[in-house]
Amino acid sequence: MGHSHGHGHSHGAASAPGTRRIWPMAVAVGLIGGFFVVELITGILVNSLALIADAGHMLTDVVALVMGLAALLLARHGRTTDARSFGWYRAEVFTAVANAVLLIGVAAFVLYEAVRRIGTDPEVPGLTLIVVALIGLAVNLGVMLLLAADAKESIAVRGAYLEVLADAVGSVGVLIAGIVALTTGWGYADIIVAVLIALWVVPRALRLATDALRILNQQAPAHVDVEALRHDLAELDIVDDVHDLHVWSLTTGMDVATVHLGSSCPNAEVLAAAQGVLSRYGLDHATIQVDPVARQHDCRDELTW
């Protein structure tokens, strides 16, 4: 088409998946997995449905952590090929969707069990619940501290973090139910706490799924005002036209942009000016095509999508 192409790439300080810490996720898998076994065996030995159900929730934590760890390892070590030019960075996003589905599934199961147990006046071993809940709370808080920093940068780690956070809230609920059952013998406290936990988990799972699906749908990141970006690029004195501006996220912390700029000025000047604008929006990885003024309309007419 006779277009001249200028590509400017620079990388900011955002934490890419390949640089995130692996060891906190690995330690978290060991801690949560170990407690899952302890809680499940205890629940079976004392015939406590509450502990067995909570162990099921803990199992989703283990699955979420393992998937998150696998996603980070793939992002770091997965090979980039001609057919898979972005490597495995999107593995994090698929993991987040799976985590959200697990969270919603556990919440639905808890609500179902709560409804099913209405009218049964369940017997709850209060002291056992208290001891196990305290251990579980300590484990969950420790894992949350390990994951807190990386959860801000990685959607896969955030999904695992939300799983552990939900289980920590669950441990508090089980603790309260155990105290009530031990002091009053009222087993319905277990059902009420279960329902409250489920209702607390669902909106957070939906938000996680929404964030992940936004990336998979290649929508512009929520923190980037695309219209303002287009306006700022058009305001550059050496730019005559802005078209085909696309902004999306490859995964969390990796925002990407492409844009065509019409200009009669030298490419190097246009690229430098455009990169300055894009960097202000956190778009340090951008591909910029400079179209000569005489060919701008051809580009628009030939590409209709």
Image (spheres, rainbow, N blue to C red):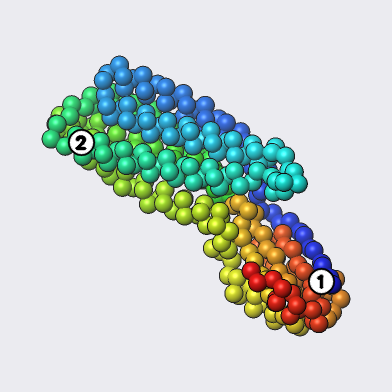
How many other residues sit within 10 Å of disc 1, few (<14), some (14-19) or many (≥20)? Answer: few
Q: Amino acid at mark 2?
A: Arg
Query: Vertically, is 69 above or below 12?
Result: above
- In which quarter of the view is residue 125 placed? top left
Residue 66 point in image, percent of width and height:
53, 33
Horizontally, residue 87 falls left or right of residue 270, namely: left
Q: Secondary structure at mark 1?
A: loop
Q: Work out whether residue 301 or residue 206 is closer to the camera in this orientation and state it.
A: 301
**Closer to viewer: mark 1 or mark 2:** 1
Q: Work out whether residue 303 or residue 37 is closer to the camera in this orientation and state it.
A: 303
Cα separation between marks 1 and 2 = 68 Å
Horizontally, residue 238 falls left or right of residue 25, namely: right
Residue 42 point in image, percent of width and height:
33, 20
Pointer 1 residue = 1
Query: Vertically, is 281 above or below 227?
Result: above
Horizontally, residue 63 falls left or right of residue 43, namely: right
Residue in the picture at 74% in, 80% down: 297
Q: Work out whether residue 286 or residue 262 is closer to the camera in this orientation and state it.
A: 262
Q: Secondary structure at mark 2?
A: helix
Pointer 2 residue = 116
Q: Is residue 126 visible?
A: yes
Residue 219 point in image, percent of width and height:
56, 61
Mark 1 in CB contact with mark 2 (< 8 angstroms): no
Q: Amino acid at mark 1?
A: Met
Residue 258 point in image, percent of width and height:
70, 65
Residue in the picture at 75% in, 43% down: 81
How many other residues sit within 10 Å of disc 2, few (<14), some (14-19) or many (≥20)? Answer: few
Query: Vertically, is 266 above or below 39?
Result: below
Q: Is residue 162 visible?
A: no
